[in-house]
Image (cartoon, rainbow, N blue to C red):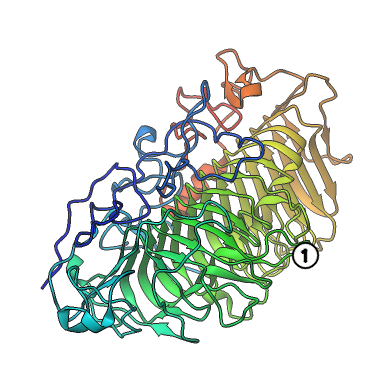
Amino acid sequence: MSPSYHPAILGAVVLLCAGCSSGSRGSSGGAPGSTGAPTAGMPPTPTAGSPPVGANPPAAGNPPVAGNPPPAAGNPPVAGGGAAAGGSGGSGSGGSWSYIGVPHPTDDLPEEIMPALPDGVNRQPGWPYDPTAIATPTWPGDGPHHYYVAHDGDDGTAGNGGNGNPAAPRRSMPGYGPFPAGTLIFLEGDGTPLPTSETTNRRSDFPGWTSPNASLEMNPAGTYADPSDIAWIVGIDRPRLTANADTSLTNSHHVIFDGVILDGIRSSDPNRSGRLRIGQSSHITFRNGAQYGEHADRGGSLFDLNDADYVMYFNNEMAYAGDFDAISAKDFHGVRPAYGNRWVWVIDNHIHHLSGDGMQTGNSNNTRPIGETSHYIYFAGNDCHDNRENAVDNKNSFHVVVSQNRLHDFTGAGGGGSNGTALILANDNEGPHSAYHWAIANEVRDSTHGIRDGGNSAAPNKSFMIGNLVHDIAGAGLAAWHASPDQPGTESHMVNNTVARCGSGIDINFWQPSNPTSVFINRNVIFECSEDIVIGGRNIDRYQVVDNVIFKAGGGERIDAEGRTQTVAGNLLGIDPLLVAPAANDLSLQAGSPARDLTTEDPVYGLFESLYGIDIRRDFSGRPRPGDGTWDAGSQRF
């Protein structure tokens, strides 16, 4: 019997379970809708002494909802595209969300082109369905591949031939398969609220997939003709499932985990938190759920990817993995597309309190060929904070877009190798193959350092920081620090950003490069930073510092380029950019701002469109640039 499907409820707020009222046995509830367009506003600053909260603090007993926070009074719209932004991400084919520079998964996508670059016409079909909005199935009736597992079930009395059904559920998980196309596994919890700290509300409802080296297989034939071919694991009332560190989903295709909570993911190694590993698989979705780790003493990752194509990680909470209070780095990550992955989306999640990175692409000990490096990775709309390492750290990877996220409170306190950097576009010499990383319209705040390009030693690294709002950073707001002998052709681009109240606005320091490097610092607004633009190091082949507006009330604005004679032109030093309400973090431009109509379009916008077929000519608020025929400096146009 084929499953029945609810109509998709687009624009609805998504909860972390498919059926959210306790005692709703027999129905998976409404379809998971969409977080929709992110709402306007800046993320509120947490009250001192309060526990960390999600993007939208949940009502008592309800799970947190991923997505953007409500607006603070008087603040401008925050990054997030969506309907209000006119579909700023993707190529315009629709979908439940939209972020600048991020294709919707149903759009045509760039072909597998590494290590060569695309020529602008090579495209291939995306997903055959929207993995973020396709409706959750309800119980279709007893069938040989339908399972119903409940926290209070009984394997001995389970109906449906022992598979369970809503009237007589089973208690234990139904093994590892292989499960054919159309398999439905329903998991019913008891509605216990999700954790609000490392030690609250932690539990497991089921004897989980706990055998060492267990390999789950679902739809191994890769069948997909219509939605009835998708294999589902559906959570009802916040089911808590325990998995082993070596539990993996392999040789599987068109699988959706919906509303499933992996809580206290345990390992056969008592010093290592567990994880869910995805390998040799395609079209895998983990949505509307959560993953919580343990206070383990070793590294790893909660959602680990190797040789996987088309993976969607959407609207989840991910937290409390590894020893994030340790003095030395324990490096337990959230999402890690390590080797050989293609087209991975990490969208609208709440990621926090990990001892490693929210997302790490690649790995520093990679020995695989360049063609097997992960590429086309999209990290967008996430609220990421309070990790021991970074929000994102790119090692071995190409074509990574980090767009319209809220990244905050990365201080590196107590140790760790990140130095409190929120976003590392390329990590110097920690992976031999890496280039084309893009940070677009992110808000980065309250960290030791903001966005850093660390270079690379075995490929001509090209990194891009475009339209970001970076403020209240103790050290460098934007930085390019290359310690490795970079390849010829290495470039760092810093364009149309607004950087406010930082130790240094833009800090360039290449101290060991053996090959020429190019730096482009154009069309930014730098406001009330202790140091403005500092360019140091050796063997910088060329740099541009053009059409920037630099101001601090105490004066002394300067571009410190150590006597270099490259292009420095059109900058406004000591002229107030007339921001609307900088004390309230409204860093948009007043009508009379000298940053208005100051400049022209930077070449990076055309480059992105030529590579990926997506127009990123939008400001931090998602509005089309230039707007009135001329270009403004900074992250937000008037």
Q: Report the front residue among 99 and 152.
A: 152
Q: Secondary structure at mark 1?
A: loop
Question: Is 323 placed left or right of 262 in the picture?
Answer: right
Image quarter hosting the N terminus = bottom left
| As drawn, 577 above or below 213 | above
Question: Is 593 placed left or right of 140 in the picture?
Answer: right
The residue sitting at 48% across, 71% down in the picture is: 341
Q: Residue furthest top?
A: 592
Q: Position of residue 212 (x, y in %)?
A: 50, 86
Q: Position of residue 506 (x, y in %)?
A: 74, 40
* Residue 122 visible to the viewer: no
Q: Position of residue 101 (x, y in %)?
A: 46, 48
Q: Quadrant of residue 551?
A: top right
Q: Report the front residue among 55 and 408.
A: 55
**Amino acid beneath label 1:** Ser
| As drawn, 433 above or below 512 | below
| As drawn, 330 above or below 58 | below
Q: Residue furthest right?
A: 563
Q: Position of residue 338 (x, y in %)?
A: 55, 71
The residue sitting at 17% across, 51% down in the picture is: 7
The residue sitting at 85% across, 24% down in the picture is: 556
Question: Is 472 placed left or right of 307 in the picture?
Answer: right
Q: Classify mark 1: residues with Cα within 10 Å, few (<14), some (14-19) or many (20+).
A: some
Q: Report the front residue among 217 and 401.
A: 217
Residue marked by disc 1:
328
Question: Is 482 placed left or right of 366 in the picture?
Answer: right
The residue sitting at 57% across, 66% down in the picture is: 397
Q: Quadrant of residue 26?
A: bottom left
* Residue 588 visible to the viewer: yes
Q: Report the front residue among 518 and 206.
A: 206
Number of callouts: 1
